[in-house]
Image (spheres, helix red, strand yellow):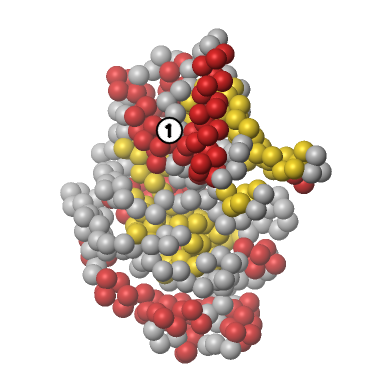
């Protein structure tokens, strides 16, 4: 398999027809629901909903099943949703748990093999091959992106560089010395790598062999992606993963870069209205809900991801019929409500990155001043020029106008010198500070 030069890692799965995918999903769903009955949590939840696995005769019956949430995982911490004997589990991952019990996800050996295969599919799909060198700048340990990409890259057959998070100068040295061709980094950190390259006089074209970048883990605009591609001279492909499912490998862009294929032999995806909890028409934005199909240790039924996206209509020229998700637009629980208006940080980023004078780092601050909610946007300049005060004032006014037209609220825009905002590091960028709770 590793020497196959096909565009597909698993052509027998990736090129299935829509009807064949649906048949596979129904079979997988019914088998998975039987596994769920090994968990007291799901036995109770199904009993309360008045439904049993035998009632599911078509994919349309999925809507009869209850949702599962992150709160369910926390309330049943640590192993309350496990559906196999604990001695059959070989690894767990968990969230930080900074706001209470962490969410714990268990894996059997087969779960890990399926996960590696899903990631390998993704990496192969964007052109990674056994003669590539793969560098992973994600943290290892409980953070799923580290080991998730590691085992997927190994399954492709690439030489892997488990650089892990931190030390940007070392990351760049590895990229140069080891001839890294495929890199995984979150978008804000990819921008940081480029900034340090510039500071060190490293030319991505002259001094590196980079050609593929895998990005994900934080919402980002098309403008940010294109800027990263231009700066690093790579093709940057969006990745979607969620630790409750397995981590990276849930969905990934193909070379067409027109949406993320979700692997429907592993998952059933729904898009619902986060308020009414009813399905929305195809093409309409809503909350992504995922049901696992193959997971042994911890199958999840209709898991509410809180991530906002939509299904993209039509066939993809790449030949894969697995449904496509639009770029993630944020989270239903990260939505900013200001003066009765719903605002998503990605809307603000899209406007900011349309100005070539601006860098990629920005910070949105919400405050309550004299009983009036305010929104301030601090954004860095791309270059170190601040002497033309009138030009900066004019730029701030234009940004304010564009943002007001987009979000229907007048923000306070402040352009700050390059390097002022410490929001981009090896971890997810901090884009919003809501200080209103302090008043």
Q: Nearer the viewer, residue 405 or 116?
A: 405
Q: Nearer the viewer, residue 281 or 233?
A: 281
The structure residue drawn at horizontal position 42% and vertical position 62%, both measured from the top left corner, is: 284
Residue 385 left/right relative to 339? left
Residue 121 left/right relative to 54? left
Q: Secondary structure at mark 1?
A: loop
Where does the C terminus fall, quadrant-wise?
top right
The structure residue drawn at horizontal position 52% and vertical position 50%, both measured from the top left corner, is: 330
Asked if one can make out residue 407 in the rendered structure from this viewpoint, the answer is yes
Residue 328 left/right relative to 82? left
Query: Across the whole image, how many numbered discs are drawn on residues?
Result: 1
The structure residue drawn at horizontal position 39% and vertical position 76%, both measured from the top left corner, is: 28
Residue 438 left/right relative to 226? right
Asked if one can make out residue 169 in the rendered structure from this viewpoint, the answer is no
Where does the N terminus fall, quadrant-wise?
bottom left
Position above or below: 153 against 397: below
Position above or below: 135 against 390: below
Specify few, some or many for label 1: CA neighbours under 10 Å numbering under 14, 14-19, or 20 or more.
Answer: few
The residue at the far left in this view is: 5
Give coordinates of residue 346: x percent, y percent.
Answer: 51, 44
Position above or below: 433 against 263: above
The structure residue drawn at horizontal position 26% and vertical position 48%, both measured from the top left corner, is: 256
Provide the residue designation for mark 1.
Answer: 354
The residue at the far top in this view is: 387
Which of the 4 quarters of the picture holds residue 262? bottom left
Give coordinates of residue 47: x percent, y percent.
Answer: 61, 87
Give coordinates of residue 297: x percent, y percent.
Answer: 52, 69
Q: Nearer the viewer, residue 378 or 193?
A: 378
Which of the 4 quarters of the picture holds residue 372? top right
Q: Nearer the viewer, residue 159 or 105?
A: 105
Give coordinates of residue 227: x percent, y percent.
Answer: 39, 32
């Amino acid at each position: 398999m590793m020497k196959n030069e096909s565009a597909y890692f698993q052509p027998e799965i990736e090129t299935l027809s829509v009807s064949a995918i649906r048949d596979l999903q129904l079979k997988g769903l019914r088998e998975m629901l039987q596994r769920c009955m090994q968990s007291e949590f799901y036995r109770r939840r199904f009993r309360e909903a008045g439904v049993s696995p035998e009632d599911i005769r078509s994919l349309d019956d999925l809507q009869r099943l209850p949702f599962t949430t992150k709160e369910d995982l926390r309330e049943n911490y640590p192993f309350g949703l496990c559906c196999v004997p604990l001695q059959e589990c070989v690894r767990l991952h968990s969230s930080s748990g900074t706001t209470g019990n962490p969410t714990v996800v268990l894996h059997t050996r087969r779960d890990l093999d399926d996960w590696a295969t899903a990631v390998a599919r993704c990496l192969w799909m964007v052109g990674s091959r056994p003669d590539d060198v793969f560098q992973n700048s994600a943290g290892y340990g409980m953070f799923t992106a580290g080991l998730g990409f590691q085992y997927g890259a190994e399954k492709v057959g690439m030489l892997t560089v488990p650089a892990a998070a931190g030390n940007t100068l070392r990351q760049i040295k590895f990229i140069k010395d080891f001839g890294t061709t495929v890199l995984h980094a979150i978008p804000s950190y990819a921008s940081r790598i480029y900034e340090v390259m510039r500071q060190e006089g490293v030319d991505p074209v002259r001094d590196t062999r980079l050609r593929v970048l895998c990005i994900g883990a934080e919402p980002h605009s098309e403008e940010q992606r294109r800027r990263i591609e231009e700066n690093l001279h790579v093709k940057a492909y969006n990745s979607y993963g969620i630790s409750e499912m397995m981590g990276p490998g849930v969905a990934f862009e193909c070379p067409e870069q027109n949406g993320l294929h979700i692997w429907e032999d592993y998952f059933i995806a729904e898009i619902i209205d986060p308020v009414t909890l009813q399905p929305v028409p195809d093409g309409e934005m809503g909350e992504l809900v995922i049901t696992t199909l193959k997971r042994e240790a911890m199958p999840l039924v209709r898991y509410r991801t809180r991530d906002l996206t939509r299904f993209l209509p039509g066939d993809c020229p790449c030949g894969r019929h697995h449904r496509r998700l639009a770029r993630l637009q944020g989270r239903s629980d990260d939505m900013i409500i200001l003066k009765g208006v719903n605002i998503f940080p990605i809307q603000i980023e899209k406007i900011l990155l349309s100005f070539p004078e601006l860098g990629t780092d920005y910070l949105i601050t919400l405050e309550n001043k004299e009983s009036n909610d305010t929104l301030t946007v601090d954004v860095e300049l791309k270059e170190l020029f601040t002497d033309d005060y009138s030009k900066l004032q004019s730029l701030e006014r234009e940004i304010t106008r564009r943002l007001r037209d987009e979000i229907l609220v007048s923000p306070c825009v402040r352009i700050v010198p390059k390097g002022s905002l410490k929001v981009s590091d090896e971890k997810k960028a901090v884009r919003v500070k809501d200080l209103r709770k302090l008043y």
